[in-house]
Amino acid sequence: HPQSLQSIPVPQLRLTEEEKRLLAQEGVTLPEDLPLTQAEERLLKKVRRKIRNKQSAQDSRRRKKEYLDGLESRAAACSALNQELRKKVQELERSNGSLLRQLQALIKETSTKPAQTGTCVLV
């Protein structure tokens, strides 16, 4: 029986480079073979949680940057539209002033003429 137990493969612990790096920062080396002790399991969970938190923070910063970039482009588009509309308002105000002057000239012209009398026939 001892020979048959030796031929059973022992599962290996597979760590990513990031996990290895963080474990080294913690000053911990884990055995290559499973199972791990409870303390080793806790350390591995802690390291994996740090990695997930780091990834989550990176994703959050990326989403925030995309959001701000979108706001900046919308603000630029609104500014351009605002400039166009200001120019249009100026053109309309000039046109309105010109039409007002023409109307005032016509009113003045018609008020100085003597009144004409006419006959209206209703059939």
Image (cartoon, grey):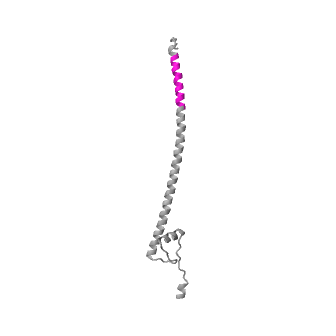
Q: Residue 60: horizontal and vertical position, in percent?
A: 49, 58
Q: For residue 52: magenta?
A: no
* 33 over 111 or under it: above or below: below
Q: For residue 94: magenta?
A: yes
Q: Quadrant of residue 4?
A: bottom right
* 82 over 29 or under it: above or below: above
For the point 51% across and 55% down, which residue is it? 63
Q: Quadrant of residue 102?
A: top right
Q: Residue 37: horizontal and vertical position, in percent?
A: 45, 77
For the point 53% across and 25% down, which residue is it? 99
Q: Can residue 86 be seen at all in this image of the molecule?
A: yes
Which contiguous range is marked in magenta? 91-109
Camera-nearest residue between 84 and 3: 84
* 23 over 109 or under it: above or below: below
* 64 over 8 or under it: above or below: above
For the point 53% across and 44% down, which residue is it? 76
Q: Residue 13: horizontal and vertical position, in percent?
A: 52, 75
Q: Residue 90: horizontal and vertical position, in percent?
A: 53, 32
| Outermost residue, bottom side | 1
